[in-house]
């Protein structure tokens, strides 16, 4: 892909007449003009260097994608969702995992996905790892290998994933928790309204407390208004005095619950200090899907109401080219564009960009993205000069700087995966 402007390949240079969201400078308001110098691998306020006029081009720090599934990614050609439903996705992924997820298969697809994310301008990723035994013993060492290989380019975290209905807290999942701790990971589960949910959650929290682990949940990814495990998670955090970060993803059912009930749950979420990550592209794909019937809702959770309560809200990619979402490329610029439309982030607070930068950093413990002197020179610069130009086009000619130098943004060819897909 061709960058819209060539930058120097050596020496410091000053980026002049760029446009940035004022919230990234700690200011109130919307977009503002800015200038900063790329001084080696960091930003500085030097002015005794060559200057480049960017004509108002928008500039952002590199993105943080805090909820992905690298281990599932890119299996669609061999395991498509038969009907586009959540159960279709769950069953298809389960069958593909049992049949195909060797260490080599997982490693190859994860590395492919990371190369996509890097080319698009992402610098930090948290991935969920399917961790029902024996897959946990296969995938976690692969994750550790890739984390080491990608150090300095993408900072990687991982969270275990299993259904709470299948996780034996005194047996296999306790062993999984040990694997997670060994690899410096995060303990996670998918919650369903199963019998004994509260006791199962208490057991999970005890596993996390004993090992000093954070928690990351998938919850209420459904259009059934009777499902409300998010509330039970918040109540358990408060009951047990759990002090480490807790993140909850999806929370779709809030949007179809009675208003008072949903808002009461959000008050409890705010009190418990939970981080919420919304995955609108995947949720739109799966939720309210019925053959021959037009969907009636967007699948997204109550992000505006959460933000109004001071809840730390982020957005992320979620699945890519697997049965849970047939599309996507771990491009956070695409996520930003689509979420703005889906969630009506326009005509709203001017600092929603933090939900793709500072908020996920806070939730996961990554360094906070910054444009201030002294920050890493890890930048995404677009030809767009304002929000409407940014969202109108995919910004395929964006510039991505890492450690102060423009990277090669050539995306990997899908044909690289053909040998795993059993395609000619």
Image (cartoon, rainbow, N blue to C red):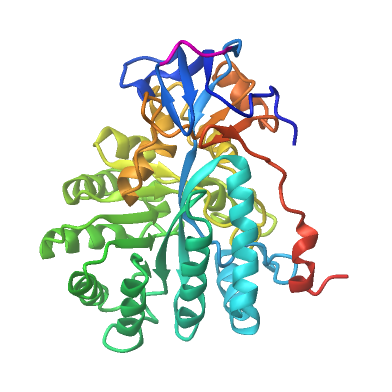
Q: Quadrant of residue 230?
A: bottom left
Give whichever of 208, 89 is nearer the camera: 208
Relative image position of residue 304 (x, y in whole percent)? 36, 35
Residue at (48, 62) in percent of width and height: 148
Instruction: Provide the residue span drawn in magenta.
Output: 46-51
Q: Which SS does the magenta portion mostly show? A: loop
Q: Position of residue 33 (x, y in %)?
A: 47, 11
Can see residue 270?
Answer: yes
Q: Is residue 60 left or right of residue 204?
A: right
- Measured as percent of width and height from the top left, residue 413 is found at 77, 54
Let me know if residue 381 is in the magenta part.
no
Mark count? 0
Left-right relation of 273 to 122: left
Residue 349 visible in the displayed image: no
Q: Is residue 48 magenta?
A: yes
- Vertical side of 255 occupied by 353: above or below: above
Q: Quadrant of residue 83?
A: bottom right
Residue 266 position, x and y percent, is 25, 46
**Is 115 positioned to the left or the right of 122 in the image?**
right
Residue at (39%, 43%) from the top-left corner? Answer: 314
Which quadrant is home to the C terminus? bottom right
Considering only vertical position in the picture, is 19 above or below 153? above
Q: Quadrant of the N terminus?
A: top right
Query: Which residue extends farthest right?
Result: 424
Decide if residue 227 is on the left or right side of residue 422: left
Residue occupying image coordinates x 24% and y 62%: 232
* Residue at image location 61% in from the left, 61% down from the top: 111
Within the image, what quadrant is residue 164 found in? bottom left
Q: Is residue 222 above or below residue 132?
A: above
Q: Does residue 127 sit above or below 58 in this rendering? A: below
- Residue toward you, 172 or 304: 172
């Amino acid at each position: 892909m061709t960058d819209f402007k060539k930058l120097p390949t050596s020496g410091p240079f000053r980026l002049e007449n760029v446009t940035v969201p004022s919230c990234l400078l700690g200011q109130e308001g919307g977009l503002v003009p800015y200038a900063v110098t790329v001084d080696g691998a960091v930003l500085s306020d030097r002015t005794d260097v060559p200057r480049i006029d960017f004509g108002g081009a928008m500039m952002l720090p590199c993105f943080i994608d805090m909820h992905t599934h690298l281990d599932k990614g890119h299996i669609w050609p061999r395991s498509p969702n038969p009907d586009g439903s959540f159960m279709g996705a769950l069953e298809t992924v389960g069958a593909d995992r049992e049949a195909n997820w060797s260490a080599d298969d997982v490693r190859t697809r994860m590395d492919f996905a990371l190369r996509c994310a890097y080319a698009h301008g992402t610098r930090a990723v948290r991935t969920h790892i399917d961790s029902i035994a024996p897959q946990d013993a296969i995938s976690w060492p692969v994750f550790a290998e890739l984390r080491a290989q990608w150090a300095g380019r993408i900072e990687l975290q991982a969270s275990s994933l299993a259904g709470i209905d299948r996780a034996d807290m005194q047996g296999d999942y306790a062993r999984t928790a040990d694997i997670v701790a060994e690899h410096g990971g995060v303990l996670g589960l998918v919650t369903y309204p199963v019998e004994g949910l509260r006791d199962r959650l208490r057991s999970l929290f005890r596993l996390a407390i004993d090992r000093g682990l954070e928690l990351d949940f998938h919850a209420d990814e459904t259009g059934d208004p009777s499902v409300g495990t998010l509330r039970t998670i918040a109540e358990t955090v408060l009951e047990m005095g759990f002090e480490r970060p807790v993140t909850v993803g999806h929370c779709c059912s809030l949007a179809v619950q009675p208003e008072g009930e949903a808002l009461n749950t959000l008050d409890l979420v705010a009190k418990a200090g939970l981080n919420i990550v919304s995955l609108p592209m995947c949720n739109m794909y799966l939720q309210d899907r019925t053959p021959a019937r037009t969907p009636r809702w967007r699948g997204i959770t109550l992000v505006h109401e959460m933000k109004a309560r001071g809840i730390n809200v982020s957005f992320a990619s979620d699945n890519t080219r697997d049965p849970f979402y047939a599309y996507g490329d771990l491009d956070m610029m695409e996520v930003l564009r689509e979420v703005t439309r889906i969630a009506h982030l326009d005509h709203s607070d001017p600092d929603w960009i933090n939900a793709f930068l500072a908020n996920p950093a806070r939730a996961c413990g990554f360094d906070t993205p910054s444009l201030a002197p002294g920050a890493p020179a890890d930048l995404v610069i677009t030809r767009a000069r304002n929000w409407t130009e940014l969202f109108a086009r995919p910004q395929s000619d964006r510039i991505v700087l890492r450690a102060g130098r423009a990277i090669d943004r050539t995306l990997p060819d899908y044909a690289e995966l053909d040998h795993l897909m059993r395609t000619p």
